Image (tube, rainbow, N blue to C red):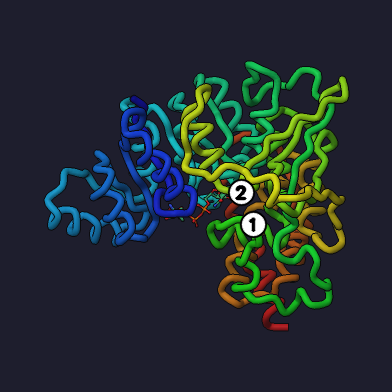
Amino acid sequence: MQAVTILGATGSIGVSTLDVIRRHPDRFSVFALTANKDVKRMLEQCLEFKPRYAVMADVSAAKELQQAIKAENIECEVLSGNEGLVKVASLPEVDTVMAAIVGAAGLLPSLAAAEAGKRVLLANKEALVMSGHLFMQAVRDNGAVLLPIDSEHNAIFQSMPAGYKTGTKPVSVRRILLTASGGPFRDADPKTLGAVTPEQAVAHPNWSMGRKISVDSATMMNKGLELIEACWLFDVGPDDIEVVIHRQSVIHSMVDYTDGSVLAQMGNPDMRTPIAHAMAWPERIESGVAPLDMFSVGRLDFEPPDLERFPCLRLAFEAAEAGGTASTILNAANEIAVDAFLDERLGFTMIADVIEATMNAIDFQEADSLETILSTDAKAREVALGIIENMVVN
Ligand code: NAD
Ligand code: MG
């Protein structure tokens, strides 16, 4: 029996994780659930899964949940804030932590799970983009088992040599082929992108996901973040990775070996497959995902990405090459710009402009301590906000 903590239980990945858990009551028990503010959904989840702890990052949401839980008369301790998140990610009773908070907010609890030597199922790619060096070191030093949830990285992991461990250099691998759907604007006339609305940007053609990652997919920053994530997970450089646009999202990524073999992992675009894979690894369990129907897929297309149409992908390649805090700055500026876009304070094509200007405004350093990471993150957010204000005024 694995005792599981889900960080970000009310989000898209959290809900899919609970769906897999629901199918296997003999294998998994829910130890703790966490969310930011969504009290209603958290209460429903607590009533169904009866966790020992429920954590709301937001203090007033935690108070509200506490009252609701009291009224329902169930036994569940309510905690709040970062301390609560870190605690349920690292308590000795926990075996597995699903790290599925979106953005930099997920860093400290995800890192705490690695430091406590847990089995860490990592969806929160921003944690690795911000602080890959420290994160991988925490995994190594504390004997944590790190398994990727991001569908591409999970596919790469599945296509690696038998016995492969994340964070180590794969033997006899020539290249990693990181697939991308190209998002909703892969065929749009670039001149029309300035007028894109948040609703259009979050309408992904193949996947149903949270709002931030959906915008990242539309700008292709998601692939950029995934490139950096892959460098850390598989101990390779950006030159060892090729981004391949594959619009059907049936192949979830590939590994090219020195003997010319290319191994791919395929399946329907449903996150319950990588989630079930990582939860049961090295075994396999039922996930609820429908079998892949090759005849309705019909064909698989591949094309190179257009870095002019998608400047965010170019910026991520540059950050990956530069190393150090470059990707911490990239990530923070992206979070601020996407937030402003979703709030209709910034145009779609200006997201890349804000990130580039922020990266130009701050000197990169070694990313060798948590203090440096956190202060760089804070500084980049401040700079990006200032840039957006200036753009709006002018
Ligand atoms: P989401 O927006 O649907 O859910 C985010 C979760 O994080 C929610 O439970 C929310 O309450 C919590 N949260 C948000 N802000 C928080 C804060 N400040 N403090 C504490 N908790 C907070 O996002 P999602 O689509 O589930 O994505 C989660 C992570 O998984 C992201 O890093 C994303 O890049 C990654 N990911 C998602 C998918 C997908 O299909 N959705 C695929 C691959 C990777
Ligand atoms: Mg992905």
Identified at 71% across, 60% down, the residue is 183
370 versus 186 height, above or below: above
**Identity of the residue drawn at 62% across and 71% down:** 341
- Residue 14: x and y, percent? 44, 48
Q: Which residue is mark 2?
A: 269
Label 1: few (<14), some (14–19) or many (≥20) C-alpha neighbours in 10 Å: some
Q: Give the mark nearest the N terminus, 1 or 2.
A: 1
Mark 1 vs mark 2, CA separation in Å: 7 Å
Q: Which residue is mark 1?
A: 206
Residue 87 location, quadrant: top left
Quadrant placement of the C terminus: bottom right
Q: The residue under label 2 is which amino acid type?
A: Pro
The residue furthest front is 295
Q: Is residue 270 above or below residue 40?
A: above
For the N terminus, the quadrant is top left
Is label 1 in contact with label 2 (beta carbons under 8 Å)? Answer: yes
- Residue 129 occupies which quadrant of the picture? top right
Q: Residues within 10 Å of mark 2 (few under 14, many from 20)?
A: many
Give the image location of residue 157, x and y in percent: 65, 29
Q: What residue type is disc 1 on? A: Asn
